[in-house]
Image (spheres, rainbow, N blue to C red):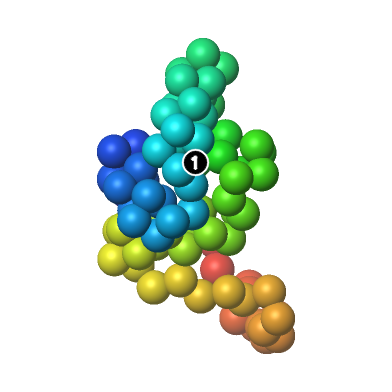
Amino acid sequence: MRVEPRQLKAFLLDAGLVTEKDFEGAQRKAKKTDQKVGDLLVSEGLISQEELIKLKAYILGIPFVNLEKEVISPEILKIIP
């Protein structure tokens, strides 16, 4: 599943995470460097990686779950490809 740049822009602006000027500048630079605009916003420090992932999950209707602090049983990890 893919999040279209126009969707990303709308949600980023609505959430107040970036300005329209910042997004447009990042979009131009992303096209020149063949990067995804979301990844460029993260690398430029305009949003965090976690903010980008949460926003994409929200747009796609997928729950975001941060497992960084969770202890996952080795038996469970063995069954995940």
Foreground of the two, 3 or 19: 19
Is residue 68 among what the camera can see? yes
Q: Residue at x 60, y 45 (%)?
A: 46
- Residue furthest top in the image: 32
Q: Residue at x 35, y 43 (%)?
A: 9
Residue at disc 1, secondary structure: helix
Foreground of the two, 63 or 37: 37
Q: Is residue 59 above or below residue 78?
A: above
* Occupied quadrant, residue 2: top left
Tell me residue 5's x, y (percent).
34, 37
Q: Residue at x 45, y 33 (%)?
A: 21
Foreground of the two, 58 or 23: 23
Return the residue at label 1: 38
Left or right relative to 51: residue 11: left
Q: Amino acid at mark 1?
A: Gly
Is residue 39 among what the camera can see? no
Tell me residue 3's x, y (percent).
33, 45
Tell me residue 35's x, y (percent).
53, 26
Q: Residue at x 51, y 14 (%)?
A: 32
